[in-house]
């Protein structure tokens, strides 16, 4: 029975599942969102959230613990300088899992993992739409401008 077993195995030996998780975390830091299977997405979330909490502390010991999991110094610097400041006062819940349905080939449940603040930035381009609308109004009110571009 599997009572209170909290290991992440992903149906592979320990080294292989650790390599998969490291690569997924690396891709999440570099790209901002990743598309993977549902089980892997849940495993990534369980690893990334504690890493963000450690990075927000900013101590040397926490930095070394992050380097232990992600042994790329440039990646850890990008993580600390670009990703972490976006969260501000948030204490938990740094990633979001969005279910995408089944994969066509084998029917595996797919999911997308993304940073919480990144999704709100993408959905909120209000300032750009106001500029476009105001430009159209000025072009329409000016009789010398041809309406072929509208």
Image: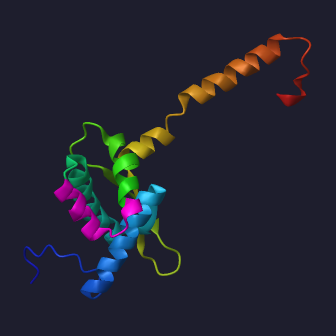
The question of residue 66 being in magenta is answered with yes
- 99 shown above or below 93: below
Coordinates of residue 33 in the picture (x, y in percent): 45, 57
Across the whole image, how many numbered discs are drawn on residues? 0
Q: Is residue 61 left or right of residue 32?
A: left
Vertically, is 21 above or below 33?
A: below
Q: Residue at x 34, y 42 (%)?
A: 85
| Image coords of residue 22 (percent x, y) | 34, 72
Residue at 25 percent of width and 85 percent of height: 14
Whether residue 37 can be seen here: no
The C terminus is located in which quarter?
A: top right
**In the shown orientation, is residue 134 left or right of residue 98?**
right
Q: Position of residue 26 (x, y in %)?
A: 40, 65
Residue under the image location 73 percent in, 20 percent down: 135
Residue lying at the far bottom in this picture: please name it.
Answer: 13
Residue sitting at the far front = 60
Q: Residue 8 versus residue 101: which sits nearer the camera?
A: 8
Q: Position of residue 57 (x, y in %)?
A: 19, 48
In the image, residue 82 lies in the stretch drawn in magenta: no
Seen at 22% across and 48% down, the residue is: 58
Instruction: Look at the image and tell me in which quarter the N terminus lies.
Output: bottom left
Indicate left or right for 74 with 150 as reference. left
Magenta span of residues: 60-75
Colour pattern:
rainbow
Q: Name the magenta segment's main secondary structure.
A: helix
Asked whether the viewer can see residue 65, the reply is: yes
Q: Camera-side residue: 73 or 45?
A: 73
Which image quarter: residue 66?
A: bottom left
Foreground pick, 84 / 35:
84
């Amino acid at each position: 029975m599997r009572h209170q077993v909290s290991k992440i195995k992903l149906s592979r030996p320990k080294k292989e599942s650790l390599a998969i998780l490291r690569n997924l975390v690396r891709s999440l830091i570099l790209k901002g969102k990743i598309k993977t299977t549902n089980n892997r997405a849940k495993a990534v979330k369980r690893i990334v959230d504690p890493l963000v909490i450690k990075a927000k502390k900013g101590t040397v010991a926490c930095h070394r613990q992050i380097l232990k999991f992600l042994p790329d110094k440039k990646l850890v610097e990008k993580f600390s300088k670009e990703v972490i400041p976006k969260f501000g006062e948030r204490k938990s819940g740094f990633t979001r899992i969005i279910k995408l349905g089944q994969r066509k080939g084998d029917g595996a449940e797919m999911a997308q993992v993304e940073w919480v603040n990144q999704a709100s930035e993408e959905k909120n381009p209000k300032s750009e739409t106001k500029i476009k609308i105001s430009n159209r109004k000025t072009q329409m009110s000016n009789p010398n401008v041809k309406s072929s571009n509208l």
